[in-house]
Structure formats: structure tokens, C-alpha cells
Amino acid sequence: MIIGFFKKSYAQAELLKNIALGIESSTPGEFITGTVNINTVPGIELNGFYYFALNRFDDYDTGFSLWKTDGTAENTSHIKSYGTSNNGNVFNNLFIEQSILLNGYFYFKEGPLGGNNTSKIWRSNGTEAGTEIIVTESNPQSSEMILLNNNIIYTDFTTTYGRELYIIPNGMPVASPQVIKDIRPGDNGGQNPIGLSSDARQLNILGNSIIFVADDGTTGDELWITDGTDSGTQLIKGIRPNGSSNPTAFIS
């Protein structure tokens, strides 16, 4: 079966470009659109192009890569490969998610590649030279990323602090993850990153702050708030004494 890359008009659906020639499929996916992509993940449009990831089963050196299109065959092109095959096997669990637009770049996360137990945060301005890793140490447990006051706030697990909130100031590349606050000090580096740290999660914007859920080891899973600084990261309220209230399903 050939899975093509099509566009739809009122007259008919037509093949836009056959990226993987022959009977193999390119399986394009994770479209970044400006409203909502086809996988129902909020996406981003940059300079009039759609950005998407695909596996090229006919080109194992390219592997999983970033592409862009403006809806025409001549302007549908490869930007950069960020996952290659191993002995002819393309890893299908490499993906783009949680895209953020900041200062002319879109930021996205790369999932774990094959047996590699790490993931990365990238940024791209739509060119090969402008597509780069900005955080080189990140864990698959890092499942959330959000924009606050021109800073990217995300959850990560490191051997120094465990799973906590981290920051990328102004979206600029950093040598290693920068923790905002070690909410649960001393619990880090174990085999269970969720159980051995604050497990910061469920990030939601509230004004100029983020509310989220964390466990400081004393109050259990409760509501916290941060403005992106150590001093501005505080417990809102221990709703359930002597246990966790486990707040969920925020609506802002």
C-alpha cells in the first residue's frame, strides 16, 4: 500500500508529492499547522509553511526527518534528519509534539529513539542551519512543555534533581537542564523518577504564572504555582491534611 501526501480541493484530492518513491510509504505525520494538526495536538504555522515529520522507508540514511511544505510540490522539501535507522530498521516511535512558537522559531520534543532512553528538545526556524538541539539531556518522562513570559518551562528528570520543573530562558540553547526549584530535595537519581522526586506535572497557564501538581514529600500531591523563579514557586494550599488531594482536570 502506498501512503501518499495529498492535498484537498473542492474539485478533487490530488497527490502533492511522492516523497518515498516506489511501493514504500513516507507516512507523513505530526503536522504543525497554526490551529490544530491532524493528530489533534495544538500546532504552529511558521512563515506560511506546514512543518511535519516522516519516516523514509526507502532511505535509511535519512530515517525520521523534518520536512516543510507550502502546499506545492516544488516547495515541499526536507529540512533535517534527527533520527536514523539501525541496520535498515526505521524507528517509528520518534515523533514531534508540543510545539511552541517563540522569536521566529518553533520548539518541539523528540521522543526516544529505539533503545535510547533519552529525548531532546529542538528548535527550528525552517532551515537546516537553524534546526538544532537546545537541551541535550532530557528524559522520556518529560511529557510537558509550556511557554511562560518568553521562557520555555518543561518537566524533566535529571540525576541531580529528579523530576522537577526546568526552564529554558528566552528559548536559547543551554548546556544542561536548568532547574527552577528543587521542590523535593534529596530524592533523585533513583530507578523510579516519578516516585523519587516531586513529579511536577499538569502545567497550566494562570495569568503570568503556571499552576501545576507536585509532591514535596510532606504535603503529598497538591496545587503549586510558579512564575519561573525559585522564590516564586510555592505551594498554593495543602487541600487534604495528612494526604494527597490529587487535583486534576484543570480548566482555565
Image (spheres, rainbow, N blue to C red):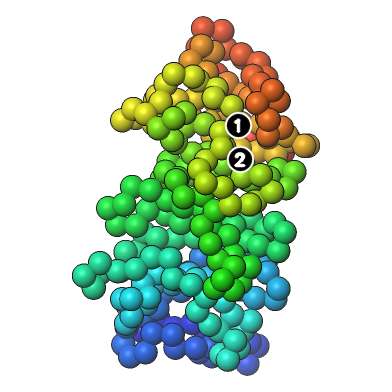
106 lies above or below 77:
above
Badge 1 local density, few (<14 within 10 Å), some, or many (20+)? Answer: many
Q: In which quarter of the image is the N terminus?
A: bottom left
Counting every numbered tag in the picture gives 2
Badge 2 local density, few (<14 within 10 Å), some, or many (20+)? Answer: many
Q: Residue type at mark 1: give it.
A: Ile
Left or right, 251 with reference to 175? right
Residue under label 2, please give it. 167
Please tell me which residue lies in front, 185 or 34: 185
Callout 1 touching callout 2 (CB < 8 Å):
yes
Q: What element carries label 2?
A: strand
Across and down, in percent, residue 171 comes to 65, 51
Looking at the image, the residue that sits furthest to the left is 87
Question: Which residue lies at the image location 64% right of the left edge and 35% below the top edge?
Answer: 250
Across and down, in percent, residue 116 comes to 31, 52
Residue under label 1, please give it. 180
38 lies above or below 161:
below
21 lies above or below 225:
below
Question: Does the rendering let one see residue 41?
Answer: no
Q: What element carries label 1?
A: strand
